[in-house]
Amino acid sequence: MSSSSTKDPSRSSIGSASSYLSNVSNFKIIESTLREGEQFANAFFTTEKKIEIAKALDEFGVEYLELTSPAASTQSYNDCKAIVGLGLKAKILTHVRCHMDDAKLAVQTGVDGLDVVIGTSSYLREFSHGKDMQYIIDTATEVINYVKSEGLEVRFSSEDSFRSDIVDLLNLYRAVDKLGVNRVGIADTVGCASPDQVAELVRTLRAIVSCDIECHFHNDTGCAIANAYAALQNGATHVDTSVLGIGERNGIPSLGGFIARMYAADKEYVKSKYNLHKLRDIENIVADAVGVSAGIHAKAILNNPSTYEILRPEDFGMTRYVAIGHRLTGWNAVKNRVEQLGLPLTDADCKQITNKIKNLADIRPLSLDDVDKLLRKYGQAKEDNSHHAILENIDTPDQITEW
Ligand SMILES: [Zn+2]
């Protein structure tokens, strides 16, 4: 097709014909760093840290924040109330077992909605038609009617949806849909699902319920973001994420990775909804709190020139970074960095420095920090005309590192 050459290069021409089911350009994020993320092995969030994370995510623009059940501990209860008290734009949800005691406690905290999950995965897997099924539906009915009578949103989810009996699952969802839940949720609790399985289950569910569909995917087999995308393509409406993907085991879709996926699918929609410049900040806050390296995802993307046509660094509040500390560097790349640093150097200066960098990089590659130090020092030295001496006096990269 000749028209493909004029298309936005970030858009694949294959499969972009949106089906009538697709919500790729119409979805909501349920951000679960403060629930799923709290289950990450290294996570311990103080109340202050939770508030900092909640505010940052709200500024980013996620539609929902999901918090640990107030039934988990006294602190969890108090933290729920504290975050509700912030008056954020995002709706506040808490994740509770399908149990009246838990539901009542949750309602007391003032949250906007409850994400209700049926107790255990083995429960759903093992029950057969009849008594167990009826018991689950009865319990769900009581809890859902109560939450609705309090005027709150309610989502009803199973656990381990992909290993549950499909007929039982669909009967259960049909029943809670009739009770008027806002959303039903499917959860790949063990992280075993593949995108095609997700597509099939969501499409089937979409035909059976009229409420929204939320998805929760674990990343044990590396498919979490792909599964979330497949779910949206087939009619799901809400996706669970966590910052840096933290959660139980390998976690769930990372907010940054999921956003990158959706940005590649519909850049304007994503930019109109979310404050992408805030993303790096949020990743740093959470990385500090849990002791992992931040921005792995964003950096990996931005360091790889071949991805530039898909993600514009500027949209994420970052500048394009090309590695310039190696022997193959060109003076245009160095000049680009000089401009980013705002240094008043001429093209001739840049060419001289580039030659020096190439010589030094034959010993070992220079880090960006080292290159920046060299550029700044050269820039300063120009004031008293000692810049040539600067270059002449450097013989090894270590000398710069030690400055
Ligand atoms: Zn989970």
Image (cartoon, rainbow, N blue to C red):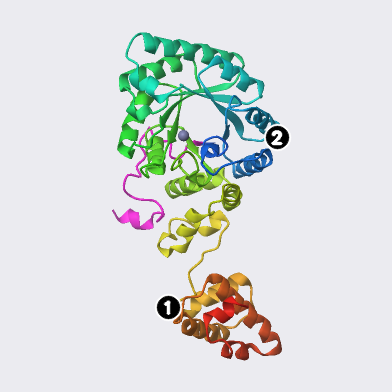
The answer to whether residue 343 is seen in the rendering is: yes
Q: Is residue 37 above or below residue 403?
A: above
**Do callouts 1 and 2 mark residues in contact (Cβ within 8 Å)?**
no
Mark earlier in primary sequence (1, 2): 2
Q: Is residue 14 magenta?
A: yes
Q: Which residues are magenta?
A: 1-29
Q: How many marks?
A: 2
Q: Position of residue 251 (x, y in %)?
A: 46, 41
The residue identified by callout 1 is 328
The residue identified by callout 2 is 86
Which image quarter: residue 382? bottom right
Label 2 crowd bin: few (<14), some (14–19), many (20+), radius 10 Å: few
SS for tag 1?
loop
SS for tag 2?
loop
What residue is rendered at 42% in x and 27% in y? 159
Which image quarter: residue 172? top left
Q: Position of residue 320 (x, y in %)?
A: 52, 64
Q: Position of residue 73 (x, y in %)?
A: 62, 28
Q: Is residue 115 above or below residue 4?
A: above
Q: Is residue 284 magenta?
A: no
